[in-house]
Image (cartoon, rainbow, N blue to C red):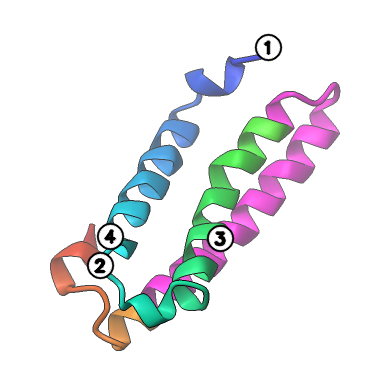
Amino acid sequence: MIKAYKKLIVWKKVDELAYQIYLETKRFPKNETYGITSQLRRSVLSIPTNIVEGSGRQSRNEFRQFINIALGSLAETEYLLEFYFRLKYLDGECFNR
């Protein structure tokens, strides 16, 4: 199994981000479990998983393609965090981390 991605600083950071968001979303309202909670979890988990998938590809172009997908998921996650902050699902301290 290829584990080169584990050496990437960016992967370590987004892996930790995904972990922290999963912990935070446990506190979201239960009626949002299949709505916005799921959307945020899927978008944030897409970031490190696309880096992992790209690192397992054979060419640099394929790797770049997955990095671009990860960047798109990062932008989506950023927007969702801002939106959930406005809904007061996230406090200022958590949001600023």
Residue 33 image-quadrant placement: bottom left
Q: Quadrant of the N terminus?
A: top right
Residue at mark 3: 43
Give the left or right position of residue 43, taking residue 59 as reference: left
| Percent position of residue 39, x then y | 54, 69
Task: Name the amino acid, label 4.
Answer: Glu
Say if the magenta span includes residue 74: yes
Q: Which mark is residue 27?
A: 2
Give above or below for 13 relative to 58.
Answer: below
Task: Name the amino acid, label 2.
Answer: Arg
| Percent position of residue 35, x then y | 51, 78
Task: Name the amino acid, label 1.
Answer: Met
Say if the magenta span includes residue 68: yes
Residue at mark 4: 24
Task: Name the amino acid, label 3.
Answer: Ser
Q: Secondary structure at mark 4?
A: helix
Q: Residue at x 48, y 76 (%)?
A: 36
Circle 2 packing at 10 Å, graded few (<14), some (14-19), many (20+), is: few
| Front one among 37 and 30 | 30
Q: CA distance from mark 3 to mark 4?
A: 14 Å
Q: Residue furthest left?
A: 93
Q: Earlier in the sequence, mark 3 or mark 4?
A: 4
Give above or below for 63 relative to 33.
Answer: above
Q: CA distance from mark 2 to mark 1?
A: 35 Å
Q: CA distance from mark 1 to mark 4?
A: 31 Å
Q: Secondary structure at mark 3?
A: helix
